[in-house]
């Protein structure tokens, strides 16, 4: 299969990609910025290239917007680009209120033949970046280190 562009923002945390989906204005870029402020690396804002490789789904920046993120009310801001990383979790914003205590295992969405766990997420005012990091730790796929990506941050 070939790479496809997926409508989502994505950051790299500890060598894994966290995909952030939602309609315009739902807080994708704001959550990505909050995570970047905590040490995550930007993979893509509003679009990410996804390609299957060795049973994983690799998230990489689309060339035309690599290293750019929209800061609402400010404009496009250049940031360093993280290395491609395997997608480990999809957070969906702007949908029905999420479960207070989601049951494991989470539902999964299959993209290019690879199943990725999906968690409905409210980026509300209470520590959204910290909660997103915990969601990745608790519900994200775990990968052995590989030569495909270098960790942006070690936890």
Image: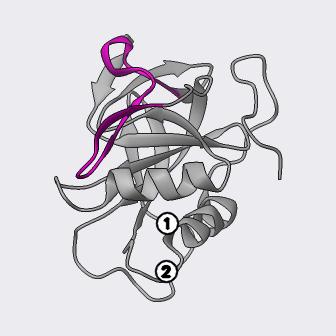
Please indicate whether residue 98 sits to the left or right of residue 138 in the image: left
Q: Residue furthest front?
A: 74
Q: Secondary structure at mark 2?
A: loop
- Residue 26 image position (x, y, % from top left): 24, 62
CA distance for labels 2 and 1: 7 Å
Name which residue lies at 28% across and 82% down: 97
Q: Based on the displayed image, in which of its 4 quarters is residue 143 positioned?
A: top right
How far across and down, in percent of the image, does residue 29 sit?
Answer: 35, 50
Residue 119 is situated, as x and y percent measured from the top left of the image, at 43, 65
Return the residue found at the far bottom: 100
Q: Is residue 53 above or below residue 44?
A: above
Q: Residue at x 26, y 37 (%)?
A: 7
First to last magenta residue range: 58-78
10 Å neighbourhood of mark 2: few (<14), some, or many (≥20)? Answer: few
Relative vertical location of residue 35 with respect to residue 51 in this rendering, above or below: below
> Is 44 within the magenta?
no
Q: Nearer the viewer, residue 106 or 133?
A: 133
Residue 87 placement (x, y as % from top left): 54, 38
Residue at left offset 23%, top offset 52%: 73
Residue 13 sits above or below residue 67 on the image? below
Residue depicted at 30% across the width and 64% down the height: 93
Can residue 90 be seen in this snapshot?
no
For label 1, count other residues whose C-alpha is less than 10 Å away and answer few (under 14), some (14-19) or many (20+).
some
Residue 125 tag number:
none
* Residue picked out by circle 1: 106
Per the image, label 1 sits on a secondary structure element best described as loop
Q: Is residue 120 visible?
A: yes
Q: In which quadrant will I find the N terminus?
A: top left
Disc number for residue 102:
2
Tag 2 and tag 1, C-beta contact below 8 Å? yes
């Amino acid at each position: 299969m070939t790479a496809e562009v997926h409508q989502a923002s994505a950051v790299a945390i500890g060598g894994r990609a966290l995909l952030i989906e939602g309609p315009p204005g739902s807080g994708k870029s704001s959550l990505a910025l909050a995570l970047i402020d905590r040490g995550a690396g930007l993979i893509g804002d509003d679009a990410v290239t996804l390609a299957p490789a060795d049973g994983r789904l690799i998230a990489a920046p689309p060339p035309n917007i690599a290293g750019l993120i929209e800061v609402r009310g400010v404009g496009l801001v250049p940031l360093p680009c993280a290395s491609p990383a395997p997608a480990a979790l999809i957070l969906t914003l702007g949908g029905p209120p999420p479960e207070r205590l989601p049951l494991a295992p989470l539902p999964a969405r299959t993209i290019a033949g690879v199943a990725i766990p999906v968690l409905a997420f409210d980026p509300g005012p209470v520590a959204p970046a910290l909660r997103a990091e915990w969601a990745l730790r608790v519900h994200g796929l775990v990968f052995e280190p590989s030569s495909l990506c270098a960790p942006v941050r070690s936890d």
